[in-house]
Image (cartoon, helix red, strand yellow):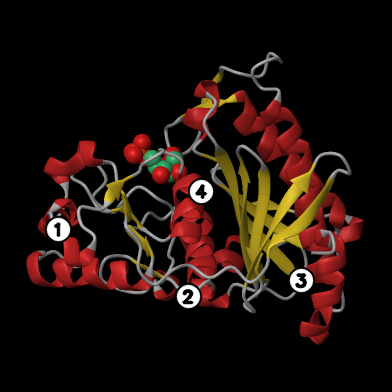
Amino acid sequence: MKTQTLGQFIIEKQADFPFAKGELSRLLRDIGIAAKIVNREVNKAGLVEILGETGTTNIQGERVKKLDVFANDQFIAALSAGGEVCAIASEENDEIIPIDSEVSKSARYVVAMDPLDGSSNIDVNVSVGTIFSIYRRTTLSGPGTVEDFMQRGTEQVAAGYIIYGSSCMLVYTTGKGVNGFTLDPSIGEFCLSHPNMQTPKMGHVYSVNEGNYLHFPEGVKKYIKYCQDEDKATNRPFSSRYIGSGVADIHRNLIVGGIYIYPTTTKSPKGKLRLLYECNPLAFIIEQAGGKATTGGKRIMEVDIKELHQRTPLFCGSSEMVDMAMDFMTKYTKEKV
Ligand code: P6P
């Protein structure tokens, strides 16, 4: 296959967005630039003194690792300089970051991101990722406001993730399918490696932190037992694969098929994952790849967002597996999700 860089691909697809006049293309380019810089640091994290912790905690109450801060800074800098964004929301920042610069005066987009998802895995050399979601601003002018982020996932104009693993991949959608690009370090470019990604309707992998089993809704407990039962006709038992880095688990399941579940637990009664910058962008990608993403009750992208760091349960992946898990939730779980 002829090498096609992310930049070439974006320009080629720009015709899909006559209204965008290149802004969206430039925005995706800016994200690609920051991703390359973060990847370079993630790759040498073991060597350079940026492991360990800053001694601070973020709004999630999670201890912030230096690479979190570095990644957050890189994406904010690249997006601010690019001039297409009037505000950024980040897992690492309690409040939104309004962009009020000369270059961003006519900016029409806002970006929500988790700059380094799964960062607790950094010190043990396990894949981590960045997740991003792009909306058109709803306010008229000036720096963006939190209002610009109070939009359902169905309003996203683009979404994607970068996975810093055995190779660095950028996967994104603009609503016309999902395409994956692998970083070629020899030329410093993301090159199209996974055109038009489609997730299998059925898979044999389930990803859930079974350490929380006792605190799961009854429907999840029953579904896990279903996955573990012996049944040749349906290739059960399925395999349990849980990395603790959602981007890595969901990326694997996207490619080979599977279901990822982070349900409500007694510790996280609304679920753990964040709607704005984790679940909505992942849901957009998964649906564009032919999969499904729900709260266990309703479509993720139709959940109304009321606050920036709102949590939600997440069931996502192969459509037939999500449907099956929903059936168990309907049959056995009383609480509304
Ligand atoms: P637990 C990472 O913090 C994350 O948001 C997801 O990437 C990951 O799947 C999940 O939380 C891990 O959470 O509670 O199983 O350690």
Nearer to us: label 4 or label 3: 4
Image quadrant containing the N terminus: bottom right
The image quarter containing residue 135 is bottom right
Q: Which mark is residue 290?
A: 2
Q: CA distance from mark 4 to mark 1?
A: 25 Å
Amino acid type at image mark 2: Gly
Tell me where residue 235 appears, x and y as whole percent: 24, 60
Question: Tag 1, which secondary structure?
Answer: helix
Instruction: Work out whether mark 3 precedes mark 1 in sequence or the reverse, and give the earlier one.
Output: 3
Q: Secondary structure at mark 2?
A: loop
Q: Quadrant of residue 281?
A: bottom right
Q: CA distance from mark 3 to mark 1?
A: 47 Å
- From the image, tell me which residue sits under label 3: 108
Q: Are marks 3 and 1 in contact (CB under 8 Å)?
A: no
Determine which residue is flagged by label 1: 226
Q: Earlier in the sequence, mark 2 or mark 3?
A: 3
The amino acid beneath tag 3 is Arg
Badge 2: few (under 14), some or many (20 or more) residues near its Cα, within 10 Å? Answer: some
Q: How many marks?
A: 4
Q: Looking at the image, is mark 2 or mark 4 nearer the viewer?
A: 2
Comes first in the chain, label 1 or label 2: 1
- Residue 309 appears at what percent x and percent y? 46, 52
* Mark 1 residue crowding within 10 angstroms, few (<14) / some (14–19) / many (20+): some
First in residue order: circle 4 vs circle 3: 3
Q: Secondary structure at mark 3?
A: loop
Residue drawn 77% across the image and 65% down it: 142
- Measured Cα–Cα span from mark 2 to mark 3: 29 Å
Which label was assigned to residue 211?
A: none
Q: Which residue is mark 4?
A: 247
Q: State the residue in front, 133 or 150.
A: 133
| Numbered disc 4: secondary structure | helix
Q: x, y (%) of residue 331?
A: 9, 71
